[in-house]
Image (spheres, rainbow, N blue to C red):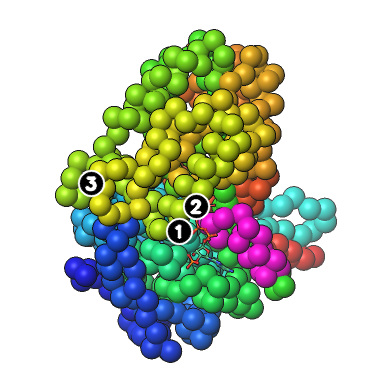
């Protein structure tokens, strides 16, 4: 093990062991070697963290009543602290998750931008005056909800934590962050940044632990006022159910099965590049992966050739000591799950155009070859279920209506791509796609300023942009009788 960063829980401004004294070992998925030994939070630790966050949310004269400009300065200071440690966090994230340093670096940059974006919002979160009959003054105030819980998956551990922490803190809330037990390390750097930024004790708490214990407790805790959950649709439904016992608000960012719809008039090189990036980045372990390529029959072969060629020229490796551009999947079980889906695709009659197994030249690491399936119909398992790995399913269409029908025939509705040079096609198809995010001639793309979230089983609520400010504030109406 060569990890030398933080390994304990961070509660109420203190680095602390789990009450049980338990720890768990994380693994480097590129080498299959143990990487770090981390304190394992369970229910009692989550209770301690929530109590600290509750106290900090209600303590007078500190976080809640801090002037908005000062709160913004704290967020900028968090961004500064993260920026100063960027190389270290990139390295940790690469070893813990398997993503390449290049990919990890993009994630950390996105977090820095997100904190700065919300730092600028702190003094602009305002209410309204409401015109009412009679001699009255009536106005609204947008107040923080209180304690926010953040349950984060393993595919973008640092980035997704920052995505919900930044708006929650900007709005004046306090936070308890539970990263995935598969990738708990980078989350602890938020605690380091909070210390450096001088956040009052208890404002930000980090509790690495398992979903079934720590995550579950956070979702059901009566003193948690909002749960921001990012993860699978199945677990998200359970989180929503448990939060509903206390009528606690939730933001759910769940799975996806994104279609990239390519029309014959598209720039096919650009489309192939976007489709490649959209499914093989992060080894395909992306909620917003463009895992279905829905292509017009007249350009099917040209597009497939280009995508296959790109897939076959992508070097696999961690990118740390080699020139790898696509890392391993996160764990042995994830690798096996992806390989099982590949077998199902073959059994159901799809054709492997490239990939379809583990690379022969790797002695270690949970790698899966970039895989492209052709002859896929949209009712096949590999076109309907989220594989969460580097597997692309190509489906052809004959006209615009059929393209829209195929794209929308999914339980998910997170992100879709449209590739065309015709403005009318672009806007019309964007209008008819049942997706929370549609991107034209670029895939995938998001910014701190743009709302992120899905339709249907891809989620509920929105992160990022001004929409997140509504998730993390509640409206109070004040009526004053002036007679
Ligand atoms: P999971 O749903 O398995 O886990 C997500 C988080 O929930 C983890 O921290 C996990 O902890 C925790 N968890 C697990 N069980 C429970 C429980 N019973 N109660 C509370 N928390 C629990 O997802 P994965 O980590 O496997 O991530 C992949 C999924 O995330 C994919 O479906 C992907 O599409 C989705 N995702 C969605 C995004 C979006 O923005 N829409 C972005 C990124 C991913 P632990 O890991 O320790 O068990």
The residue wearing badge 2 is 337
Residue 327, x across and y down, in percent = 31, 47
Q: Residue at x 57, y 48 (%)?
A: 255
Task: Report, in whole angstroms, how far the alpha carbon at label 3 lies from the one at label 1.
Answer: 22 Å
Residue 116, x across and y down, in percent = 36, 51
Q: Residue at x 77, y 66 (%)?
A: 481
Residue 141 placement: quadrant: bottom right
The answer to whether residue 413 is above or below residue 365 is: above
Along the line of sight, the residue nearer the viewer: 350 or 102: 350
| Of callouts 3 and 2, the N-terminal one | 3
Instruction: Pick out the residue farthest to the front.
Output: 347
The answer to whether residue 192 is above or below residue 14 is: above
Residue 189, x across and y down, in percent = 31, 66
Residue 59, x across and y down, in percent = 49, 81
Provide the secondary structure element on which disc 2 rests: helix
Q: Which residues are magenta?
A: 229-244
Q: Residue at x 57, y 55 (%)?
A: 232
Please say whether residue 245 is one of the residues in the magenta stretch. no
Kindly check if marks 2 and 1 are in contact, taking CB atoms under 8 A apart as contact. yes
The answer to whether residue 14 is above or below residue 354 is: below
The residue wearing badge 1 is 333
The circle drawn on residue 319 is: 3
Kindly check if marks 3 and 2 are in contact, taking CB atoms under 8 A apart as contact. no
Q: Residue at x 35, y 48 (%)?
A: 367
Instruction: Pick out the residue farthest to the bottom.
Output: 20
Nearest to the eye among marks 3 and 2: give it.
Answer: 2
Crowd rating for badge 2 (residues with CA inside 10 Å; few <14, some 14–19, many 20+): some
Q: Main secondary structure of the magenta part?
A: helix
The circle drawn on residue 269 is: none
Task: Report, in whole angstroms, how far the alpha carbon at label 2 lies from the one at label 1.
Answer: 6 Å
């Amino acid at each position: 093990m060569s990890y030398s960063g933080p390994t304990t829980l961070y509660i109420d401004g203190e680095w602390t062991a789990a009450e049980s004294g338990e720890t768990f070992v994380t693994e480097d998925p590129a080498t299959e070697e143990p990487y770090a030994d981390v304190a394992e939070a369970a229910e009692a630790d989550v209770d301690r963290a929530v109590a600290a966050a509750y106290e900090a949310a209600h303590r007078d004269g500190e976080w809640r009543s801090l002037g908005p400009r000062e709160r913004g300065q704290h967020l900028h200071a968090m961004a500064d602290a993260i920026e100063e440690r960027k190389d270290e966090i990139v390295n940790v994230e690469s070893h813990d998750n398997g993503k390449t340093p290049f990919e990890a670096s993009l994630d950390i940059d996105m977090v820095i931008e997100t904190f700065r974006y919300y730092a600028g919002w702190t003094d602009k979160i305002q209410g309204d005056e409401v015109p009412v009959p009679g001699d009255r003054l009536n106005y609204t105030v947008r107040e923080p909800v209180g304690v926010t819980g953040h349950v984060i998956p393993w595919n973008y551990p640092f980035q997704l934590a920052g995505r919900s922490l930044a708006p929650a803190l900007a709005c004046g809330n306090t936070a308890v962050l539970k990263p995935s037990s598969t990738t708990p390390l980078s989350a602890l750097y938020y605690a380091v940044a909070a210390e450096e930024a001088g956040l009052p004790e208890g404002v930000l708490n980090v509790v690495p632990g398992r979903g079934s214990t720590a995550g579950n407790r956070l979702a059901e805790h009566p003193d948690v006022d909002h749960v921001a959950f990012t993860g699978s649709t199945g677990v998200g439904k359970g989180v929503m159910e448990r939060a509903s016992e206390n009528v606690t608000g939730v933001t759910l960012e769940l799975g996806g099965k994104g279609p990239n719809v390519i029309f014959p008039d598209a720039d096919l090189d650009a489309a192939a590049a976007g489709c490649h990036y959209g499914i093989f980045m992060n080894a395909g372990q992306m909620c917003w992966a463009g895992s279905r390529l829905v292509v017009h029959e007249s350009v099917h072969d040209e597009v497939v050739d280009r995508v296959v060629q790109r897939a076959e020229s992508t070097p696999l490796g961690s990118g740390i000591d080699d020139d790898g551009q696509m890392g391993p999947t996160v764990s042995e079980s994830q690798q096996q799950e992806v390989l099982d889906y590949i077998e199902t695709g073959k059994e159901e009659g799809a054709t492997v155009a490239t990939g379809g197994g583990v690379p022969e030249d790797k002695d270690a690491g949970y790698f899966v070859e970039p895989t492209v399936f052709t002859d896929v119909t949209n009712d096949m398992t590999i076109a309907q279920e989220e594989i969460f790995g580097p597997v692309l399913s190509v489906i052809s269409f004959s006209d615009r209506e059929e393209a829209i029908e195929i794209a929308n025939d999914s339980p998910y509705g997170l992100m879709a791509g449209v590739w065309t040079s015709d403005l009318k096609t672009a806007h019309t198809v964007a209008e008819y796609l049942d997706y929370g995010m549609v991107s034209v001639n670029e895939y995938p793309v998001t910014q701190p300023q743009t709302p992120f979230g899905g339709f249907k089983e891809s989620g509920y609520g929105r992160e990022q942009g001004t929409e997140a400010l509504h998730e993390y504030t509640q409206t109070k109406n004040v009526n004053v009788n002036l007679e």
